[in-house]
Image (cartoon, rainbow, N blue to C red):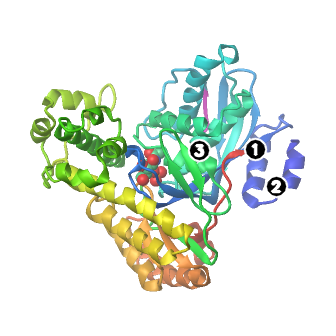
């Protein structure tokens, strides 16, 4: 579409800012395209996607947009007006050297490398892949557990798919983007990329993995979800990356111990690639017999070696190695395998129960499962923090039906189920009790915006359509 025509068509201020920024950066380009990808809020099913279990997120009306034109070469040139990140350029190949750890440009490189490798195997004639000139904008709060980073990855994936006429089927693209994002160094499970691609305007999604299957869930009328940011940044680089990978690796260590415990009774289950597959073979009813043999304390490497019948060096090489040079540090309190797995199994059951409750309109039950999920994230998975706890109590005191942290944890956002008629009143009350009386006075949290801009940190969200080209 002609850029002036686009300016006349897309009136919302974010897209207007995007188009104007593109005009300024690339004044000679007249025919442009716009790709978009929403963020997501996870309603229930936390830290279980990477164990193979289904989750229930909802794509929300906060998104990343990229205005772009195809390049004739493999060069990618991109500006970010979203977080004032520096300009980045590179060539697409199957082995793209990453920028420094934590650089935003790695979220652009990740999907490019993944799509190059995918295409190389299938359509030799489309190699080298064409790049693009683009400008990115967005209104998903970064590092808040709303998947701004996966929205960037998915949005760029859509751009590359479009520019090269690849026409990749949606669930394949979701899977590719999930694996592709591991390029930045986190071992996530695939929920975010699928939620961003499969979003729909009627409500949440039930997403199952391997292979990806998505069911659209319709929300009963009269209820809303409020997202509130704790203002504690939940970054996924640095220490937070170790915390995240520690949880994912602890679950893998749990799986090898489990396999050793069941190997005589269920030889088939020893090949299972995830906790879910293993549990499917064993059956929920038989799980406690083995699970109860895992000590409840934090386990040392020596104890894990004993319980899994592996050597310590095997465990280190197979499970603790993060990349060529880094190993996961052994936590001082040991690996709390029992507690982490207890969360995973119970949370997986809660997701199924939530779906059933939502389908029959029992929102009291949905709220109860959300509260239980939060308690489990706090006590068993230990991913909460004092700010999230304080915010949750402000929300509950203001009258939410159910409230929980959402996303990876250690800060970021909460999600609450409320009666739609109560939403505005609850937002006003929590604005006062959390943001004015607490967060604005704490010196190590993100700055609290003015009252007029409060929807940047607390808002009732709407379900949104999935990523694509406008
Ligand atoms: P966020 O909230 O974007 O940090 C991460 C993982 C998800 C999932 C959740 C926890 C990535 C890209 N995302 O999400 O796959 O494991 O944590 O439920 O790693």
Q: In this view, does 351 lie to the left or right of 198?
A: left
Image spot of residue 315 (x, y percent): 20, 32
Q: How far apart are marks 1 and 2 (CA)?
A: 10 Å
Give the secondary structure at mark 1.
strand
* Number of residues whose C-alpha sits closer than 10 Å to that of mark 3, classed few (under 14), some (14–19) or many (20 or more): many
Nearer to me, 29 or 318: 318
Nearer to me, 194 or 187: 194
Label 2: which residue?
10
Q: In this view, does 286 lie to the left or right of 65?
A: left
The quadrant of the image that shows the N terminus is top right
**Could you say which disc has been placed on residue 34 in the image?**
1
Q: Do the residues labelled 2 and 3 touch (CB within 8 Å)?
A: no
* Number of residues whose C-alpha sits closer than 10 Å to that of mark 2, classed few (under 14), some (14–19) or many (20 or more): few
For residue 122, say whether it is visible: yes
Image spot of residue 376 (x, y percent): 31, 64
Give the secondary structure at mark 3.
helix
Considering only order in the chain, which callout, 3 or 1, is on the residue closer to the N terminus? 1
Q: Do the residues labelled 1 and 2 touch (CB within 8 Å)?
A: yes
Q: Is mark 2 within 8 Å of ligand 1?
A: no
Nearer to me, 230 or 164: 164
- Residue at left 47%, top 54%? 55
Image spot of residue 268 (x, y percent): 29, 33
Label 3: which residue?
152
Q: Name above or below for residue 449 compared with residue 58.
A: below
Highlighted magenta segment, given as a residue range = 85-90
Asked if the magenta segment contains residue 200, the reply would be no
Q: How far apart are marks 1 and 3 (CA)?
A: 13 Å
Q: How many marks?
A: 3
Q: Distance between the residues labelled 2 and 3?
A: 20 Å
Asked which quadrant contains residue 380, the reply is: bottom left
Considering only order in the chain, which callout, 3 or 2, is on the residue closer to the N terminus? 2
């Amino acid at each position: 579409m002609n850029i002036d025509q686009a300016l006349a068509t897309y009136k919302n201020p974010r897209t207007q800012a995007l188009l104007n920024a593109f005009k300024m950066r690339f004044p000679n380009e007249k025919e442009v395209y716009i790709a978009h990808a929403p963020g997501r809020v996870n309603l229930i099913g936390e830290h279980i996607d990477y164990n193979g279990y289904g989750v229930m997120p909802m794509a929300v009306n906060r998104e990343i947009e990229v205005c772009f034109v195809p390049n004739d070469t493999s060069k990618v040139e991109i500006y970010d007006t979203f977080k004032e990140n520096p300009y980045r350029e590179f060539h697409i190949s199957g082995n793209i050297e990453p920028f420094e750890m934590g650089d935003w440009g790695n979220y652009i490189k990740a999907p490019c490398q993944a799509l190059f490798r995918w295409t190389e195997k299938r359509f030799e004639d489309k190699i080298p892949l064409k790049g693009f000139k683009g400008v990115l904008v967005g209104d998903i709060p970064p590092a808040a557990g709303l998947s701004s980073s996966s929205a960037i990855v998915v949005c760029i994936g859509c751009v590359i798919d479009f520019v090269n006429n690849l026409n990749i089927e949606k669930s394949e693209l979701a899977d590719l983007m999930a694996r592709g994002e591991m390029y930045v160094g986190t071992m996530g499970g695939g929920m975010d990329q699928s939620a961003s691609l499969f979003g729909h305007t009627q409500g949440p999604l039930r997403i199952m993995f391997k292979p990806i299957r998505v069911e659209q869930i319709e929300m009963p009328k009269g209820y809303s979800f409020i997202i509130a940011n704790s203002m504690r940044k939940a970054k996924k680089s640095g220490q937070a990356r170790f915390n995240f990978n520690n949880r994912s690796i602890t679950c893998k260590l749990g799986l090898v111990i489990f396999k050793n415990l069941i190997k005589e009774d269920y030889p088939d289950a020893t090949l299972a690639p995830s906790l879910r597959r293993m549990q499917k073979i064993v059956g929920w009813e038989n799980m406690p017999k083995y699970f109860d043999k895992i000590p409840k304390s934090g386990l040392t490497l020596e104890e894990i070696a004993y319980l899994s019948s592996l050597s310590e060096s095997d465990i280190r090489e197979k499970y603790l190695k993060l990349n060529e040079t880094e190993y996961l540090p052994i936590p001082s309190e040991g690996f709390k395998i029992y507690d982490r797995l207890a969360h995973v199994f119970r949370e997986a059951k809660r997701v199924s129960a939530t779906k059933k409750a939502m389908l029959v309109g029992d929102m009291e039950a949905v709220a109860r499962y959300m509260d239980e999920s939060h308690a489990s994230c706090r006590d068993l998975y230990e991913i909460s923090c004092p700010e999230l706890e304080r915010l949750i109590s402000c929300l509950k005191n203001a009258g939410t039906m159910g409230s929980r942290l959402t996303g990876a944890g250690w800060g970021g956002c909460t999600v609450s189920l409320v009666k739609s008629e109560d939403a505005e009143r609850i937002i006003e009350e929590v604005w006062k009790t959390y943001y004015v009386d607490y967060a604005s006075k704490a010196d190590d949290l993100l700055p609290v915006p003015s009252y007029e801009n409060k929807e940047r940190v607390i808002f009732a969200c709407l379900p949104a359509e999935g990523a694509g080209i406008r």
